[in-house]
Image (tube, rainbow, N blue to C red):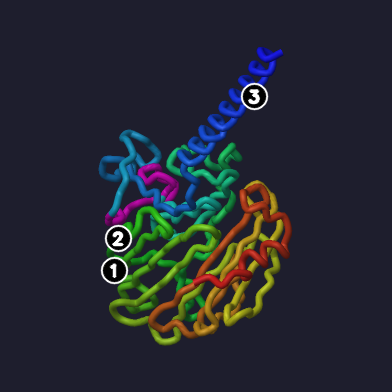
Amino acid sequence: MKYLIFKSLFIGAMASFLAVSCNEKNETQKESIPEAKSIARVIFKTQDAPFILSQKSEIKNDYKSQENLTVPQDLAPQNKWVMFEGPVLENELIAYRLYMDSRHRFDIYGKKTNSMVMDTVGWNYHEIMDWGSDILKVGESLGIGSPAIWYSDSLYTLSNCSKKSIQVIKKEGDVASVIFTFKDLLIGDQKITLTHLWSLGTSNPHSTVELKVIEGKLPEGAKFATGIVKHLPDVESGIEKDKFFLFNWGKQSFHKQNMGMGIVADTVFNPMIQANSLNHLVVFQNSKQGVKYQFAAAWEQDVMNVKERAKFKNLLIGPVHK
């Protein structure tokens, strides 16, 4: 009997010891696994050789990350010299790219994962893959939030200049950003030097554009402008918390799935909707020397889980974005 009691006590003590040890081990394991952090980053790569127009669609060299670059004057659309045709800003929710050639337009990558994946994506990004897809057809429009200038009832994109350069300001962190400088940008018969600061933070899909005239001035009557491509005929717009907003939602993605696109700007710039055949166009009436605004998108298949118009509107204008 004493033996049985001793044996029972021994087994109980060992079970308690093992349970405590396992718990301690599990706690140690939990502590050793770092929490996933939300970050934003720049992916900007070109082939490690000069651009040759006749070879624009060929991949002959490895891609190399760039921090500063003067854009070749003859850089053509649909080139593969620049990975993604221009710099990409990515966070855990979305990614945007900017066509680096004379189009200077924004495009959207929808993400089906919170992981940072754009540096692993190849040239088949128009297909819907496990990570996501290119989800916007830009064409000749402003795509989403591309900068432009409205002058003499015409829309000028940032294209006709003597020199265009790109500098990565912050490659990775809570904000990622790049700046473009346009030397002798021709608007009408006047030349200006203009900077375009583009940034993306973490935790939301809002990307910021800040345009500044640093030499010269816009022609009399010229104003900065932006917009979203007119894949859908209608938009909703209004003012909330001193912020102007314009957006729509519907089957307008590259694959004809539901997607929302929108613009947000401070009312101090006096944004007004202007009729335009290709774009839902916003002209900033008070923008003589510059303007600052944001654009954002969400896709029905992405990680933000936005499935309806009202939810996208809340995403766009709900938080106070700075």
SS class, disc 3: helix
Specify which label sits upstream in the sequence, 1 or 2: 2
Q: Residue at x 40, y 42 (%)?
A: 80
Image spot of residue 293 (x, y percent): 49, 72
* Residue pointed to by mark 2: 165
Q: Indicate which label's residue lies in the foreground, 1 or 2.
A: 2
Residue located farthest toward the front when viewing the structure as drawn: 2
Q: Residue at x 50, y 74 (%)?
A: 225
* Residue pointed to by mark 1: 183
The amino acid on which the numbered mark 3 sits, given as a three-letter code, is Gly
Residues at marks 2 and 3, CA–CA distance in whole angstroms: 73 Å
* Residue pointed to by mark 3: 12
Specify which label sits upstream in the sequence, 1 or 3: 3
Q: Is residue 286 above or below residue 20?
A: below
Depth check, front residue: 149 or 314? 314
Q: Is residue 211 above or below residue 95?
A: below
Please give left or right for residue 190 compared with residue 78 in the image: left
Q: Is-magenta flag for residue 74?
A: yes
Image spot of residue 83 (x, y percent): 40, 44
The label on residue 26 is none
Magenta residues, start to end: 68-85
Residues at marks 1 and 2, CA–CA distance in whole angstroms: 9 Å
Quadrant assignment, res 235: bottom right
